[in-house]
Amino acid sequence: MIADRTPIARGTSSPDPARHRAVELDDRFGDPWDADNPLGYAAVLAADERAELLAAGEAMLDNFRLGAEFVPTALGGRLSRLDHLIEIMRVVFRRDPCLGLGYGASSLIAAVNVWTGGREAQRRYVADLLIAGAS
Amino acid sequence: VTAPAGSATDAPAVSPVVALDRALAELARGDGPFAPARLAELDHREEFPVAACRALDEAGVPGYYVPTRYGGRLARFPELMELWRVIARRDLTVIIAHGKTLLGAIGVWIAGRPEQAARLGHEIVGGAVASWGLTERGHGGDLLAGELTATGTAAGWRLDGEKWLINNATRGHLICVLARTDPAGGPRGFSLILVDKRELAAGSYRYLDKELTHGIRGADISGIAFEGAEVPADALVGRAGDGIEIVLKALQLTRTVCVSLSLGAAEHALTLGVRFAVQHQLYERRLIDLPRARRTLGEAASALLVAEVVSVVAGRSIHALTGEMSVISAIAKALVPTLVEGIISQLGELLGARAFLTEVYASGSFAKLERDHRIIAIFDGSTVVNRNALVNQFQGLARAARANRCDRAGLAMATTLAAPLPGLDPAQLSLIARAGCSLVQGLPAAVAAIQDLARRGAVPPVVAELAARLGDAATALHAELAAAVPSPRDVPASAFAVAARYELCFAGAACLQLWLHNVDRVAAHPAEVGKGDAADATAAALWRDALWLEAGLRHVADHLGLEPAVRKADVYDRVADVVALHPWPAAFSLLTAISPAGPP
């Protein structure tokens, strides 16, 4: 249980907002070994057995506004450094790779095309969608 | 029981193996019990493959679980292994569920009283399912820690305790249980008891739920708990206190037979890989025409041939080198499933998404076989357990090598495919291989023989070079064995790596011996190969220019980390050429090129 959380430094003195968000996200996921936790491993496996994306996980990530992590700060999002994004996504993948891919990574993969090659209006449109929580 | 087609009036008579293969092909059509889509659906629902097992019953397969002297058809273990391989090529869950009856009965074949064995044989031929209760919750492979007790009563034995993770514990009619009969335990503190569940008093036993599993999802992996279950005195198998010894001897047979399951899975995987590589278009070419894909197929097929050689030699050794089976079974059970895991992994890479999708390609049977196969390296003694068993004999193996011991007659019989095998004499099974391992100890002579053939131009020079490197590696390895400090409890991790290298030397030696003892049989009948069955053409191509031998030795050298002077890996590409032309899903095997015993 401890090992599951160790990669994230929990010092309160860290001024790093991305680290702070990773810690917050991990807290929102709760105790992975708690059988009653709707975001715990038991719930993750049960969703897998039903061939479903973990609905409670999607709701939590909506609430956390994970989509904003994929949007550059210039467009109003929270993406300034890829290593910070990796740190945050690592938290999701550590809990459930299915959720990490199904909810998060595929939005990012789609959006980067627009960040790199889209017109301004397209970028604005996709940024607003992701910040609003569409995945 | 319906007799297999092999014994029917077909002319010319086909072997039971070919007959079963044809029957299974029919049963795989449409909505038949072996149809991949139907098996996938059962797997998805975690349902036992009832119809497929019934079809095997109707094909007479249970007869091969019973020795001929007890009313069955089991005369030679290699034939049973071929049958299992053919079934495993279709579906591992089915054969693991069905084949368990052999494991449940084998203790009785080894140590039971004749009338006890005859009665059990009659039951099994008639369709009874037997199970083998060895493991318990919390003990796993540590049989001496077993807590289920059998206490002597006026009328027989009373059983208390549970067995867990038992294949067919719930579905079986009989279960052969390893029970503690001396509270102090120890090697003589356990006995084997054949429990007929149908005769137990109601309430004296209950089942432990089927456990959900990652692979073989439909199999009945459950448990049984006895509470004051009374069985008659004649339920005892062998003598009281002999349980561990009987089980360890039985495992020498079952571990060997089980490698045929891996072999079938590897063939299934290769079939799926090649079919995809032929159909799939990439960059305006077929996948199979891309050099990287071709190399992968050639490597996988070469590993399969090594696995086949080890399997057939180990299977024949049950009859020909019976006293060495404690070593040979451990080698085979550690090596073959490991080889096949590598094959599956390589082919999975080739298949890409098709290995991951559970419906799109071949009803997802690749992903299923990958999951199902995981159990082979775990059950009936895991790879680690088998390597540990080999490590325990390092000193004896080193001594036997130093003394140049080699049972040449047994070795020739084990590796000459046309040589008739004697029936198994269970009394020859031994917990320790006093003569060591004739295959590995016979390496120097085999290397010399190959070098002689190379000098005469009968095999390519590279084969002699690879053989020489293997011989050197074995010599160095024997020195390592001798230097290993015996430590029955805290076995050093490095010893397991040495064991793995010993297995590879065994594999290389088996390749050499199989070549030396059979090539004349192939060459003597050149007119027969290549005509008739198309699979024969494959085998003929593999024997030509010692192709399979070079590929097998190359595989062994690569995995031993040897650096032969000639480092060309193109032999794998030449094997791939054969693979590409092979009429899949026909059996991919070296053995079909060998003329059977007797006049052709």
Image (cartoon, coloured by chain):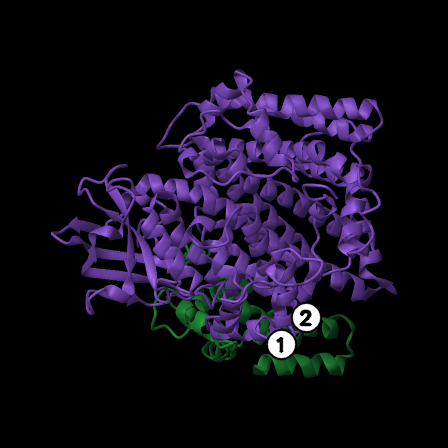
Residue B571 appears in which quarter of the rendering?
top right
Q: Secondary structure at mark 1?
A: loop
The percent position of residue B155, horizontal first and vertical second, equals 14, 54
- Residue at the spot 19% in from the left edge and 69% down from the top edge: B203
| Marks 2 and 1 close (CB-CB < 8 Å) | no
Q: Which mark is residue B515?
A: none
Q: Position of residue B308 (x, y in %)?
A: 63, 45
Give the quadrant of the C terminus of chain B.
top right
Residue at screen point 77% across, 51% down: B536
**Chain assignment, label 1:** A
Which hue belongs to chain B? Answer: purple
Amino acid of disc 2: Tyr
Query: Can residue B493 be seen here?
Result: no
Circle 2 residue: B361
**Is B197 left or right of B515, judged from the image as shown?**
left
Q: Is residue B340 left or right of residue B169?
A: right
- Residue B511 shows in this picture: yes
Three-letter amino acid code of the residue under disc 1: Gly
Front residue (pair B222, B537): B537
Query: In this view, which residue lies farthest toward the left?
Result: B154
Q: Position of residue A12 (x, y in %)?
A: 40, 59
Q: Nearer the viewer, residue B158 or B60?
A: B60
Up-down relation of residue A111 to residue B301 (above or below): below
User: Label 1, on which residue?
Assistant: A76
Residue nearest the viewer, comparing B562 with B307: B307
Residue plotted at (65% across, 21% down) = B444
Q: Are marks 2 and 1 on the same chain?
A: no
Residue A70 picture quarter? bottom right
10 Å neighbourhood of mark 2: few (<14), some, or many (≥20)?
some
Shade representing chain A: green
Choose between B259 and B353: the one closer to the eye.
Answer: B259
CA gap, disc 2 and disc 1: 44 Å
